[in-house]
Image: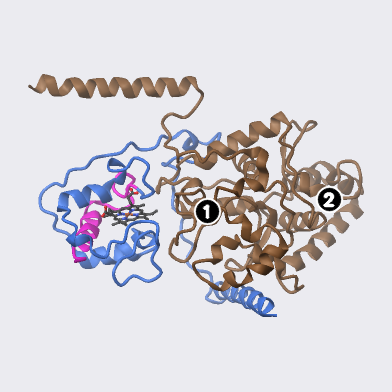
Amino acid sequence: MSEHKRTPALAAAALAFCALAAGNVLGEQANRERYPDAKIDPAKGVEGDVGFSDTIQYWRTEADLERNAGMADKPDEQWKLNGKHMDLDRIDLHPGHMAVDEGAALVKKLAARDAAFLTCLGEGTADLKGKAAAYPKFDAALGRIVTVEGRIEHCAKSVLGEEIPQGKPANTKISVYFKSLSAGVPIKVDIGDGKVMEAYRRGEQSFYARTGQLNMACASCHVPGSIMGHKLRGETPTTPFGDTAHFPTYRTPVGALESIQERFARCHNQMRTQKLKPGDPAYTDLEVFMTVLSNGYPVSVPSAR
Amino acid sequence: MKRTLRMLAAVLTGLTFAGMAGAQGAPAPQAPPDYSVFPCLSYTQACGKVATRPPVKKALDGPLNGNPEKGKQLAQARNRGNCLACHVIPGGSQPGTRGPDLSHFGSSGRSDAEAYAMVFDMRTVNPETLMPPFGTNDILNEQELRDVVAYLLTFR
């Protein structure tokens, strides 16, 4: 009898082993649980939200936002505005605007030491207008994916020998200034670039990977059927589409500027997952994935959330 | 105008909180918890290669012997069980709405052992569950699990 009992257990173990081996052949982490794939099409950009959260109808344009402004005051509806209603507040008072001025002053000061700092930021010209909308991008000379914050860190170091690391206030302020010069320009991450797509696919893997003590993935809160649109105590997680457009942002609950990768780290803390440093290759790939999901949506910096 | 006021209020609140943290003096520096024994996204650190702990179907050993009062604290505390993040629980404020309402869980006919196994690791019931495996991932210890289950079973 006991022999009989053991056989299925052995068979199950053998099967599990085969599954593991097969997973490894595919180059996947077979031993890492994943949230089910939501099958996002990168070619659709921000329009991928149609049939996903379907909230884009409320926040796609300023006219949509104006029409649906009343939803901001309804606790069950506000999440459908995806925070975009806050971008209509064009008052000069919030610290996001102050960061633009501070970032501009920093760039001026650094460029005074060596004008090459500015032409490094602008990849050959001193004119930064509209350029941030094409980030993250693959930089062939550097041989890696570069975000706006990564470009700032690189130029400070290579031109001035100065450390302005990603995630530090000086870097974030310069980023806010840099991106504000693209405000209103539709985001266009180049998905025709094979290296960008490789990063997108790695970022996508990370989006669905369950991590940490709570065994949650980004997707656990940000795809249909997950916690998205449901109350998670005080908060209601929103769609990932269009999200990176307003970063770096001034976070009112934190009282500080926050880059998208610092936001990833704060999420990871909430998910009881080992957080990574801004600029970590895994976070950079995640930013690529997230920003492709904003393709076609205008850069919305400065902002407050 | 209304929007502007709302934004101003939000900004001021943010500043107030930021200010408060400073005014209260530096809070005792707490060592950040170490989550690196669990999977992370790094391509290079060890946690990037850590496996998900497989689901554990845990049998309840002996009588439940839980303390519902302690269970209540655990279920509501954000840094512990935080069951309220996803569930409506009697008397809890700002409940989450993704998980089923647990207000009458004690009348659902579940035995102590069934309820315990669910909280220990819900993946044994639903492999794709959103509920964290409280026992398997050491979020709650053995006695804490029993306390939380005893608390759940008081909801009639």
Is residue B146 highlighted in magenta? yes
In this view, A285 is above or below A50: above
In the structure shown, which secondary structural element does the residue marked by tag 2 occupy?
A: loop
Kindly tell me whether residue A86 is visible in this rendering: no
Q: Amino acid at mark 2?
A: Gly
Left or right: where A156 falls relative to B7? right
Give the residue type that dot 1 points to. Cys
Instruction: Determine the residue positioned at 45% across, 54% down.
Output: A227
> Residue A120 location, x and y as percent?
86, 43
Q: Which chain is blue?
A: B
Specify the quadrant that holds the C terminus of chain A: bottom right
Chain that is brown in the image: A
Callout 1: 10 Å neighbours few (<14), some, many (20+)? some
Q: Residue at x 61, y 63 (%)?
A: A83
Q: What mark, if any, has residue A267 been given in the picture?
A: 1
Q: Which mark is residue A146?
A: none
Name the residue beneath numbered marker 2. A130
Please provide the residue range marked out in magenta.
B133-156
